[in-house]
Amino acid sequence: MTQFRKGLWRSALAAAAVAGFVTSAAAQMELKIMAPAAPGGGWDQTARSMQQALTQSGIAKSAQVTNVPGAGGSIGIAQLVNNSKGDGNQLMVMGYVMVGALLTNKSPVTLDQTTPIARLTTEYEAIVVPADSPIKNAKDLAAAIKADPAKVTWAGGSAGGVDHIAAALFAKAAGADPTKINYIPFSGGGEALAAILGGKVTAGISGYGEFESQVKAGKLRLIGLTSAKKTANVDVPSIKEQGIDLEIANWRAVVAPPGISADQKKALTDTMDKMAKSKEWQDILKAKGWEDAYVSGDAFTKILADEQARTKDVLTAVGLVKS
């Protein structure tokens, strides 16, 4: 072999080694994912689903999940911002519930202090009434709430959460005063469901999964989902398609700590981009019935800023946040 060919061969080997190292380094990323809630809830399920998809696909070497519950994620985000600054291997699952919780809890730590990475999934809200209710559709409910907003009682999750926000937005779209809505928060989905089935409230609001079995059993009537259009798995027009201008989704996302470098942010974003496209992640979405709402980079940063502004306006309008 000539000296020239030997040189070419060594260069090719060196290039292959570098390429292999880069690929290997990307696959060797050891991630830490915080779920700022107790085990079993939506954020925890998202974190553990990410762990499964990332490790089974080989996109990351490992993904360790930790739970930091309390105050709608307020404790978790404080830990992320104060204790993980500059850590390019740390992620935290969050979502729309946290946006409202940080405002209502007057958290000293805000989402503006985190590094937005990507929105992952979304789940639309469902509005239901008891099967024997005189309310048959969204227009009937809108007419009732416009006539007397205090007389229409809503059962949903925590005050200031996505259920409460959706009820306030429905009232506003119906032409009623959102500060007058009669919203009853329940700590658990089972308690809210019992109140709806027992006819103790006018309507219930939550993720569709909470009501699906009772709707299919004929015990609850689905008024509609808060999606832009009718979804494939629900044979009822959306609230918006029925003439009430309401569109809201309970989305889930991931953010990183403050103080990470541009390269660290790119590495995390690239990892999430790969995960979102992986067969392992897509299979999980189908199994759990989650809508794929993946958006990363500057587009997600803008969505997060817009959602914070809109949520503050709504919570101020219903008196849960002081202007």
Image (spheres, rainbow, N blue to C red):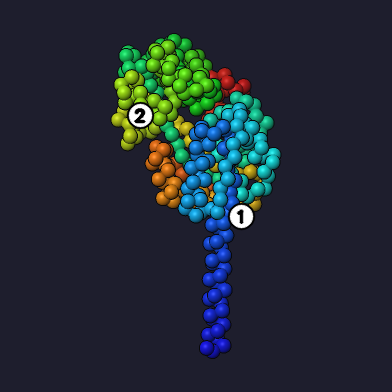
Give, as a three-letter code, the residue at label 1: Asp
Number of residues whose C-alpha sits closer than 10 Å to that of mark 1, classed few (under 14), some (14–19) or many (20 or more):
few
Query: What is the number of the mark on residue 65?
Result: none
Give percent across and percent down for residue 19: 54, 67
| Dot 1: element | helix
Residue at the image position 51 percent from the left and 41 percent from the top: 48
Q: Examine the rendering and report whether any part of residue 38 can be seen.
A: yes
Residue at the image position 57 percent from the left and 19 percent from the top: 319
| Quadrant of the image occupied by residue 234 | top left
Which residue is more in the foreground, 213 or 316?
213
Number of residues whose C-alpha sits closer than 10 Å to that of mark 2, classed few (under 14), some (14–19) or many (20 or more):
many
Distance of label 2 from label 1 (alpha carbons)? 42 Å
Of the 4 image quadrants, the one containing the C terminus is: top right
Count up the numbered dots. 2
Residue at the image position 42 percent from the left and 27 percent from the top: 210
Query: What is the number of the mark on residue 263?
Result: 1
Q: Examine the rendering and report whether any part of residue 226 can be seen.
A: no
In this picture, residue 14 sits left or right of residue 152: right
| Quadrant of the image occupied by residue 288 | top left
| 128 lies above or below 275 | above
| Quadrant of the image occupied by residue 237 | top left
Give percent across and percent down for residue 141: 37, 17
Residue at the image position 57 percent from the left and 33 percent from the top: 37
Q: Which residue is mark 2?
A: 238
